Image: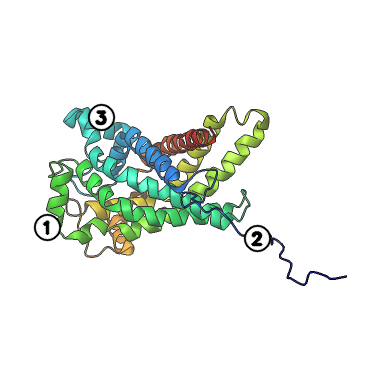
């Protein structure tokens, strides 16, 4: 009986990793969102946070600046500082420099939150309770975003000073470039990073831990109270991180405002040099100047920021799922 000697071809199934249809529009997601959605959510959160709390930030800057003509003497504390500004300059004095904040906060926070989410995804390795991964992700995010925010933060603080010689953002940028060079915009970058690295590590680790703790208190209603949970955890994280890093924030303000309105000018941007000058003039309590408005800023600011950010994420998740 004759047999068919021709080769027999059988369909071969593709390997598991083979994808017959590849779409360039398929971008990696985390928490069900795309990279650009984290950027938009972060930008909205940062802008809302800083705009809402800007008057308190002005009080902090005035109290931290050294120099007879540029600072509000903190003898009477926050109440006296606020009264002095309202009496001499009116309510508008609390909002000088807000345009610079608007130009810097949005882009910087877009970078901040998107880098944080990507870093958290890479470092946590599937463990949502990994506090070390949250802290490390926060540090990576802040180092990156500070490079974006520092120039506008310097402009903002110079405009916030009493008797500021600048007419506005454009005038400040132009005069600083002509008189001091582009390096002046980054004079405090090293100090800012050294300050914000521990600030962000404490902030993010505390936020994630507080959020878990608050959700465990009432797990049955956690989804219904998401806004309260994020706001509460953010407030605790912001207050603690602000208190721990106030001395470095004082140094940052000194470097960004040096030589303006009679504020001290430093021979170098060395943190040690600025520390020594502050201690010599005001003693060690001088390193804590403005700590009350700093905490009053960061506790509600963090609550606003995190609740806005999480609400924006939930909005995008709802759109994507529909």
* In this rendering, the label closer to the viewer, 1 or 3: 1
Say which label, 1 or 3, has the lower sequence index.
3
Q: Residue at x 63, y 52 (%)?
A: 127
**What residue do we see at 38% from left, 57% from top?**
193
- 307 or 153: nearer the viewer: 307
Q: Quadrant of residue 125?
A: bottom right
Which residue in the protein does label 3 denote? Answer: 83
N-terminal of the two: label 2 or label 1? 2
> Secondary structure under badge 2?
loop
The total of numbered circles placed on residues is 3
Residue position for label 1: 179
Q: CA distance from mark 1 to mark 3?
A: 34 Å
Is 162 placed left or right of 132 in the picture? left
Residue 282 seen in this snapshot: no
**Which tag is nearer the camera, tag 2 or tag 3?**
2
Give the CA distance from mark 2 to mark 3. 75 Å
| SS at badge 1 | helix
N-terminal of the two: label 2 or label 3?
Answer: 2
């Amino acid at each position: 009986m004759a047999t068919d000697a021709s080769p027999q071809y059988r369909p071969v199934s593709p390997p598991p990793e083979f994808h017959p249809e590849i779409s360039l529009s398929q971008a990696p997601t985390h928490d069900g969102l795309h990279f650009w959605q984290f950027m938009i959510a972060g930008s909205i959160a940062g802008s809302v946070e800083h705009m809402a709390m800007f008057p308190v930030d002005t009080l902090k800057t005035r109290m931290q600046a050294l120099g007879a003509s540029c600072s509000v003497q903190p003898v009477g504390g926050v109440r006296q500082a606020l009264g002095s500004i309202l009496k001499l300059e009116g309510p508008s004095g609390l909002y000088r420099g807000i345009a610079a904040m608007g130009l810097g906060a949005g882009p910087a926070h877009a970078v901040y939150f998107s880098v944080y989410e990507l870093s958290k995804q890479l470092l946590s390795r599937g463990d949502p309770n990994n506090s070390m991964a949250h802290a490390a992700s926060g540090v990576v995010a802040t180092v990156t975003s500070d490079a974006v925010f520092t120039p506008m933060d310097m402009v903002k603080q110079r405009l916030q000073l009493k008797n500021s010689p600048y007419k506005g953002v454009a005038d400040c940028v132009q005069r600083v470039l002509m008189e001091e060079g582009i390096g002046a915009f980054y004079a405090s970058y090293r100090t800012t990073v050294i300050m914000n690295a521990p600030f962000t590590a404490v902030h993010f680790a505390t936020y994630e831990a507080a959020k878990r703790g608050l959700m465990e208190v009432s797990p049955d209603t956690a989804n219904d109270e998401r806004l309260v949970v994020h706001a509460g955890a953010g407030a605790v994280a912001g207050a603690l991180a602000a208190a721990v890093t106030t001395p470095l924030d004082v140094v940052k303000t000194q470097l960004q405002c040096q030589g303006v309105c009679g504020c001290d000018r430093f021979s170098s941007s060395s943190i040690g040099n600025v520390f020594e000058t502050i201690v010599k003039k005001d003693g060690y309590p001088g390193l804590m100047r403005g700590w009350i408005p700093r905490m009053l800023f960061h506790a509600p600011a963090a609550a606003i920021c995190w609740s806005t950010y999480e609400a924006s994420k939930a909005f995008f998740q709802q759109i994507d799922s529909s």
